[in-house]
Image (cartoon, rainbow, N blue to C red):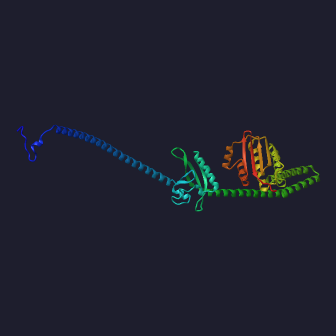
């Protein structure tokens, strides 16, 4: 019923009485509860935001980890491919810094330098070369610093005592800023090739010596034949001619004298031919009076035979030359004059012989039409014509050389041979 208050055990009715102070306290508690509820809601919202941000960060982190792993795997694969390529390219590959210290080397480079696996890195290239060669290495490294690539040959001595020749192909190895901090080198062992080149050079020298000896032997034979012709055939012919001339004086009939004159004329021509043959085989003047006199005589003979004006000049300081050298120089000049007569279409040829600063110089020049140097190269390849390349080859025996200047106005050939006069 309304207006009645139910009594409960233990609760006096008077304790349920209502007062203004109690109402205020209730209101205050409600407000505090509402504030707490709002703050709690706000915290929950912030937590949700933080949770969402954390989840997003975690997803991004996982993606970054996946991307990083992908990049690392790609780099690892590329590095493995690069290493496989470098190790199997058939050449020694190494990287050195500007102090010539190895910072990387593949297995073949280690084998070339005779070191074990991983033992080349940290060593200096200077450990394997002489002091003289070190200067060459420094020069080459400076070329790399200046941005130029290049190749050069290098002789090394390994720590096991083996000497080797290597061909180095070096290129600048710039850093990210474009500055050369390292040099990438490709090494090829060319020891066998160098040994073969040395053998070929040795064989070449032996062939030159044999050619010189053959020339001297030939000249000795020619001289012997010329001597026989001079002492035997020539003198006999001269004797027969004198006898015929004496016989002519005793003859009374003109008919017999005429026949005898014909015989004397034939013998005289034979004597002249024999003398010419003797000269061509071995000019006596070369051995009796030396090279200057022999060349002077030959220029006169050339002018007489070919109708080309020939002049010869020699200095007074020409020393006495050994037979092999003067024979070579005389034969060379004779060959040059033959070329002038056959090919130059010249009207004048001059020869010069002089000795200066321990060097013999022979110069032959003409005013002919000259020739194309390609013709000389072709003749050299085909081993025919001119004879100039054979002169040059024979001169190498004496460490001499031949130079040619040619134009439509003429040709000049210069022969130079080192010669130290004996006191």
Residue 273 position within the rendered picture, expressed as x and y whole percent measured from the top left: 82, 51
Q: Quadrant of the N terminus?
A: top left
Residue 106 position within the rendered picture, expressed as x and y whole percent measured from the top left: 51, 55
Residue lying furthest bottom: 160
How many marks the image carries: the answer is: 0
Residue 167 position within the rendered picture, expressed as x and y whole percent measured from the top left: 59, 53
Residue 192: in sight, yes or no? no
Q: Is residue 341 left or right of residue 198?
A: right
- Name the residue located 83 percent from the left edge and 48 percent from the top edge: 315
**Front residue of 190 and 23:** 23
Q: Is residue 389 left or right of residue 29?
A: right
Residue 411 position within the rendered picture, expressed as x and y whole percent measured from the top left: 74, 42
Name which quarter of the figure residue 324 lies in.
Answer: bottom right
Q: Is residue 20 left or right of residue 86?
A: left
Residue lying furthest left: 1
Residue 197 vertical position relative to residue 5 in the rendered view, above or below: below
Q: Quadrant of the C terminus?
A: bottom right
**Front residue of 151 and 159:** 159
Residue 417: in sight, yes or no? yes
**Front residue of 196 and 94:** 94
**Front residue of 99 and 55:** 55
- Name the residue located 60 percent from the left edge and 47 percent from the top edge: 143
Name which quarter of the figure residue 405 lies in.
Answer: top right
């Amino acid at each position: 019923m309304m207006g009645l208050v139910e009594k409960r055990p233990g609760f006096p009715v008077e304790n349920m009485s209502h007062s203004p102070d109690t109402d205020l306290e209730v209101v205050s508690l409600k407000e505090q509860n509402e504030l707490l509820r709002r703050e709690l809601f706000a915290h929950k919202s912030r937590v949700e935001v933080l949770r969402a941000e954390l989840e997003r960060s975690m997803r991004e982190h996982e993606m970054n980890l996946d991307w990083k792993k992908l990049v690392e795997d790609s780099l690892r694969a590329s590095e493995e491919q690069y290493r496989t390529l470098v190790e199997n390219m058939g050449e020694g590959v190494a990287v050195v810094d500007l102090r010539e210290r190895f910072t990387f080397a593949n297995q073949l480079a280690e084998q070339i330098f005779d070191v074990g696996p991983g033992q080349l890195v940290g060593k200096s290239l200077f450990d394997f070369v002489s002091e003289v060669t070190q200067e060459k290495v420094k020069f080459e490294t400076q070329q790399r610093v200046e941005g130029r690539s290049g190749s050069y040959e290098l002789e090394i001595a390994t720590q096991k005592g083996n000497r080797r020749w290597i061909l180095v192909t070096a290129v600048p190895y710039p850093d990210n800023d474009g500055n050369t901090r390292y040099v990438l080198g490709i090494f090829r062992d060319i020891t066998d090739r160098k040994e073969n080149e040395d053998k070929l050079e040795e064989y070449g020298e032996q062939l030159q010596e044999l050619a010189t000896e053959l020339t001297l032997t030939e000249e000795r034979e020619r001289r012997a034949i010329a001597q026989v012709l001079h002492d035997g055939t020539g003198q006999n012919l001269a004797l027969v001619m004198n006898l015929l001339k004496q016989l002519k004086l005793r003859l009374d009939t003109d008919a017999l004298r005429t026949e005898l004159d014909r015989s004397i004329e034939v013998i005289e021509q034979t004597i002249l031919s024999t003398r010419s043959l003797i000269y061509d085989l071995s000019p006596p003047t070369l051995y009796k009076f030396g090279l200057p006199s022999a060349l002077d005589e030959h220029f006169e003979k050339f002018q007489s035979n070919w109708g080309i004006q020939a002049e010869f000049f020699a200095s007074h300081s020409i020393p006495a030359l050994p037979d092999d050298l003067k024979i070579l120089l005389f034969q060379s000049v004779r060959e040059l004059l033959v070329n002038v007569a056959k090919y130059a279409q010249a009207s004048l040829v001059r020869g010069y012989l002089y000795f200066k600063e321990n060097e013999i110089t022979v110069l032959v020049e003409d005013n002919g039409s000259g020739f194309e140097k390609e013709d000389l190269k072709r003749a050299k390849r085909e081993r025919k014509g001119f004879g100039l390349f054979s002169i040059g080859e024979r001169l190498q025996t004496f460490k001499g050389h031949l130079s040619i200047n040619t134009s439509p106005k003429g040709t000049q050939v210069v022969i130079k041979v080192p010669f130290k006069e004996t006191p």
